[in-house]
Image (cartoon, rainbow, N blue to C red):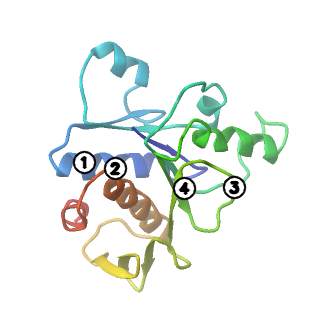
Amino acid sequence: MVGITGTNGKSTCTELIAALFNGAGRRYIPCGNHGLALSELVASGEKYDVLSLEISSFQLERISTLRPKVSIWLNFAPDHLDRYPDVEAYYKAKVRIFENQTADDWAVIRAGENVGEIKAKRVTFSSETDADFSYRGGAFFHQQRQIGDASHLKLRGRHNMENILAAMAAGWLLGLGFDGMMQTLA
């Protein structure tokens, strides 16, 4: 399971991950706050290789055992202050995505975002600074090695490049190759 949260970009990232895994021939479905409800998926009895679960702060408030193999933290900005008494309460709900992860799991985090102490191994992404996965000059990099370029992609804007970086990081952590992911993105 890949769990995705953030103030913005969750649905886009969830769909990108679905495309990457389906493009690699793996049975994959987006669910949660975007796509099929997780409860419907469980009730259907269908089997998938990987699930991407878009998770809002509202849903994270109530988790008890949720443990994604890969959790993605796209970004954080003040939001839903009609529901939460302050920004800190909203943040505390969001950061729960990492709560049940262990050192065997992964956290894909936008470089510079503060998620506090977590047990999962961290992988960073950014279009603004050096990170494990980065975007600069129209190209995608992993550990300073170019893995593709954006000239042939239909998605535009730095925010979408960061969604792509996060999706590729999740794909890589779960065994997808960069060449195949870039072909699917094209």
| Residue, disc 1 | 21
| Residue, disc 4 | 74
Q: How far separated are the C-alphas under marks 4 and 2?
A: 13 Å
Question: Mark 1: which secondary structure?
Answer: helix
| Residue, disc 2 | 17
Q: What quarter of the picture does the N terminus occupy?
A: top left
Q: Give percent across and percent down for residue 169.
A: 39, 60
Q: How far separated are the C-alphas under marks 3 and 1?
A: 29 Å
Q: Which quarter of the figure has residue 135?
A: bottom left
Of residue 21 and residue 120, the one placed in the foreground of this image is 120
In the figure, 48 relative to 138: above or below?
above
Q: Earlier in the sequence, mark 3 or mark 1?
A: 1
Tag 3–tag 2 contact (CB < 8 Å): no
Tag 2–tag 1 contact (CB < 8 Å): yes
Q: How far separated are the C-alphas under marks 4 and 1?
A: 19 Å
| Residue, disc 3 | 77
